[in-house]
Image (tube, rainbow, N blue to C red):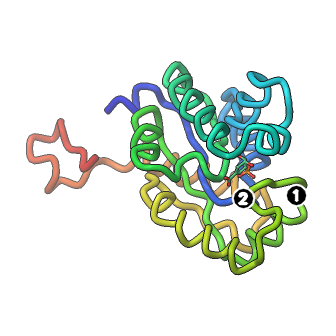
Amino acid sequence: MAGEMADNVILVGFMGAGKSSVGRILAARLGRCFVETDEMITAAEGRPIPEIFAEKGEAHFRALEDEVVRLLGLKRGDVIATGGGLPCRDGRLEALRAIGTVVWLSGDFEALYERALRGGDRPMLSGKTREQAEALYEARRPFYAKADLAVDTTGLNPDQVAARAAAALAERLTTPPHPALSPSGGEGSSD
Ligand code: S3P
């Protein structure tokens, strides 16, 4: 599978899931480089994300994410933290799975929302009520749910989440394909 050859680990999830902090710790644990899609965008645009939203709007930001997804195809062996909305369009999660193992940092909406509000300027939350933010979360869940693995972050700190993600990734690598899927013993993969 192409994703296994590119061997990246891609973190997805709602704002406040801790993708950046967990990604940094996970990269250090695995001895990999760490990449953030939001950093790629701010570097390319030369200004912070709230300014991009304010001056050019969300549609422009999403078009920049398209280009980022294309560039991610060049990455090998990295840990990649994505912006909360990046996988939430048709075909995006599939494109990410083609370049590595996608890990959803999930959690209770309440906990994610609290963390996201504490964690700085987020244009997708500003001017939104709690109910509107929850509706956004619900609309996004089916996209995140297409990830290869999920780690529930509720009640855990970033070190603990990174440890669980590392364990889930190791288990995925060492678990042989189910015999029923691999009658010849060689080509079994349900993916
Ligand atoms: C966004 C999430 C942000 C950032 C941008 C849009 C979103 O990243 O990409 O503000 O649509 O959820 P975080 O998930 O790191 O906050």
Task: Tell me if residue 143 comes above or below residue 2 in the rendering.
Answer: below
Task: Give the CA separation, mark 2 to mark 1.
Answer: 9 Å
Residue drawn 9% across the image and 47% down it: 183
Q: Residue beneath label 2, please?
A: 15
Answer left or right for 136 relative to 122. left
Tell me the amino acid under the disc marked 2: Met
Q: In this figure, which residue is indicated by the disc labeled 1? A: 119
Residue at screen point 72% across, 58% down: 15
Q: In the rendered view, would you say 75 is above or below 185?
A: above
Q: Work out whether mark 2 precedes mark 1 in sequence or the reverse, and give the earlier one.
A: 2
Q: Quick check: marks 2 and 1 in contact, CB under 8 Å?
A: yes
**Residue 49 placement (x, y as % from top left):** 80, 40
Tell me if 191 is positioned left or right of 74 in this view.
Answer: left
Residue at 42%, 41% (x, y): give it: 97
Front position in the image: 164 or 15: 15
State whether residue 152 is above or below residue 95.
Answer: below
Residue 24 coordinates in the image, percent (x, y): 76, 40
Q: Which mark is residue 54?
A: none
Q: Under tag 2, what secondary structure?
A: loop
Using the image as rendered, state which of residue 123 and residue 140 is in the foreground.
Answer: 123
